[in-house]
Amino acid sequence: MQVRETIHEYNMLAPHDRILAGVSGGADSVCLALVLKELGYDVSIAHVNHGLRGKESDDDEAFTAQIAQSLGVTFFTRRVVLVAGNIEAAGRDARRDFFHDLAAEHGFTKIAIAHTRDDRVETFLLNLLRGAGSTGLSSMPPVSGRTIRPLIKSSRSEIEAYLSEKNQIWCTDASNFNPEFARNRLRHVVIPALTSDFNSNLLETLSRTVGILDAEEAWMRQLADDWLGRNGTKAPDGLVLDVGALRLEPVALVRRVLRGALRQAGSELQDVSFDQIEQIRRLLEEGKSGKLVEIPGGIGVAREFSRLVFRHRLSAQPDYEYRLQIPGLVRIPESGKVFRAEIVESETGKTHDNRVFVDADSIGPYVRIRNWKPGDYYRPVGLPAGKLKKLFQRARIPRSHRTSWPVVVADSTIIWVASFPVSREFAPRGCSQKIVAIEALQI
């Protein structure tokens, strides 16, 4: 085996690293623990008992504890209950969570997983048959964050030969031979047939192919990350991309940028399909402003005029309504504003987007401030009368901002919409004897 060389080639470990090795009791993981200890690293062992095989699962746990004891290393174990569904994926998640919990609690700097060259090739073929792109085909990288795979260039036959030489036994999981699992059919039927009929060095050849894809994937991902670094903007309402800039790029880069943006927005990308990426890409087309694509994991991607916005979907905001006494002041947290009303002798000072003058005789002792509602009709001074939605669109106010936009009303008639002119029927006239100034201030 070439474990020492693999660790050095990929710069997996430094002398000060504390390693948590995931050990199931099978040949690969037992070999991992023995080799790391033999090479002089500070290693501990973690085992997850999934309880799927009853006494056999308990026996695997006891065996792994004995391995830890014989090596003189710390042993951690956790028992989990896996619910119905994708048991294989649930088991992976349970192990990952346990290992990361231990690393955080006990200060392990690296998590070692016993994936081998054979595992890597099997995953490559499974993903290929499922229609994965280049990202999915570059499976099981030697180093991924603090997770390392020191056996990634070692074959299963080399591992078993090493253990036999050490007179070290291991556990055999009978479920690894169950043909109901696609990986087992691939391992025991498909790969032997391909090796026999097409390429006697198939595992070595495909392992080299995956290595090439890994290097190219890292390069292309860096290109996408660099593009996002130059063109992506983090705003209060999410991650924003410029539609015009993204349209100029090649399709392959656009897809990678979109995946990178989803990742930055909090998606793990596990359940994001190619078709969903294409739905997002179609938001770049003309006439798509106002459209939304929902992504698994609670993320929405919205086209808002010249922006593509990635954000966590928020639950629908409830309606609000406040009373503003004249004179008086009211805080409206839903809009992030404070509204102030005062009586003035004349229209002193300029009217601007956040301050207007109102004929006091046309309103009562107070006004109400509520959120925008579909169907609101508005007659602003100097602008065509019409539905407020159309005014929002002309002002290029994103749909995500409209639902909480403050509207000042008297009875059911709109007096003023923040950032726009006062309504015509409430604007002061030459005969107005009393004037009210209403102002919206940012909290």
Image (cartoon, helix red, strand yellow):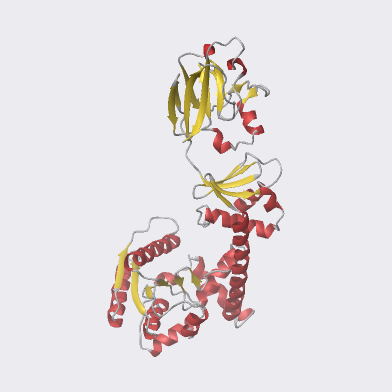
Image: 388 above or below 399: above
In the displayed structure image, the side of residue 131 where residue 345 appears, left or right = left
Side (left or right) of 168 relative to 317: left
Where residue 122 sits, quadrant-wise, is bottom right
Residue 417 appears in the figure = no
Spot occupied by residue 177 in the image (x, y as percentages of width and height) = 45, 72
Horizontal side of residue 350 vs 328, given as left or right: right
Residue 356: tell me if it is visible: yes
**What is the residue that sits farthest to the bottom in this orientation?**
165
Number of numbered discs: 0
Nearest the camera: 237 or 184? 237
- Horizontal and vertical percent position of residue 217: 60, 68
Task: Give the residue at x 67% y 47%.
Answer: 284
Question: Which of the two residues, 291 or 17, is positioned nearer the viewer here?
Answer: 17
In the image, taking residue 293 as reference, residue 91 lies left or right, namely: left
Q: Nearer the viewer, residue 343 or 11?
A: 343
Q: Residue 142 in the image: state x and y as whole percent.
A: 51, 74
Can you say whether 156 is above or below 49 in the image? below
Above or below, 218 relative to 151: above
* Residue 38 on image: x %, y %: 37, 85
Q: Residue at x 36, y 88 (%)?
A: 167
For image coordinates 67% across by 48% down, the residue present is 243
